[in-house]
Image: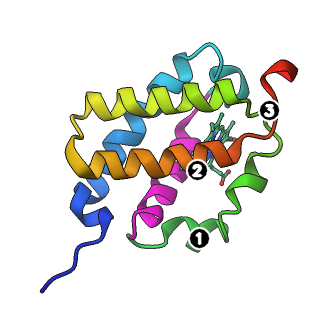
Amino acid sequence: DQVYTPYEAIGGADIISNLVDAFYTRVGEHPELAPIFPADLTETARKQKQFLTQYLGGPALYTEEHGHPMLRARHLPFPITPSRAKAWLTCMAEAMDEIELEGEHREQLFHRLLLTAQHMVNTPDSEN
Ligand code: HEM
């Protein structure tokens, strides 16, 4: 039997692209997130599409171009507070709503992203 990766199950490159675009539209408008991101999110979105592709078991596009993700290390230059992690996840949930990503694939992806987002926290809310 064919075994599907989460990448395939979710709908592949088109779905990831739509999700990431809907997500960064919200990030760019979010009062807590926008100030720590570049004004032009084109390159950020391109990298996130590559990353999520491999995170879900698709081709290792991020690593091929940028090397090991080392995500926590790559986020250390930015003050990631618990409040910003929550905001990031809210933007993601709204993006999932917008593209109508539903059911168990949505829940599994969101749960993994929740754990990854918590792992990125490097600054207490009080030092924000
Ligand atoms: C890059 C913020 C969580 C994946 C970035 C950048 C910021 C940021 C400011 C730099 C953007 C740029 O210079 O282009 C945050 C905040 C988070 C968070 C506030 C809240 C917890 C996550 C999570 C993931 C993730 C959960 C993975 C699922 C990435 C990737 C990049 C990135 C792949 C690009 C790294 C690179 O430059 O190669 N993030 N992030 N981030 N973030 Fe996050």
Query: Distance from label 3 to label 2 (Cα)?
Result: 16 Å
Q: Is mark 2 within 8 Å of ligand 1?
A: yes
Q: Give above or below for 53 relative to 31.
A: below
Q: Position of residue 45 (x, y in %)?
A: 51, 43
Q: Position of residue 6 (x, y in %)?
A: 31, 64
N-terminal-most mark, 1 or 3: 1
Query: Distance from label 1 to label 2 (Cα)?
Result: 17 Å
Q: Looking at the picture, which amino acid does disc 3 mark?
A: Pro
Please state the extent of the stretch shown in magenta in the rendering. 40-57
Q: Nearer the viewer, mark 3 or mark 2?
A: 2
Q: Which residue is mark 1?
A: 63
Q: Which residue is mark 3?
A: 79
Q: Farthest right residue? A: 127
> Could you tell whether 21 is left or right of 83 in the image?
left
Give the structural element (helix, strand or loop) at label 3: loop
Give the structural element (helix, strand or loop) at label 1: helix
Q: Farthest left residue? A: 1
Q: Which residue is mark 2?
A: 116
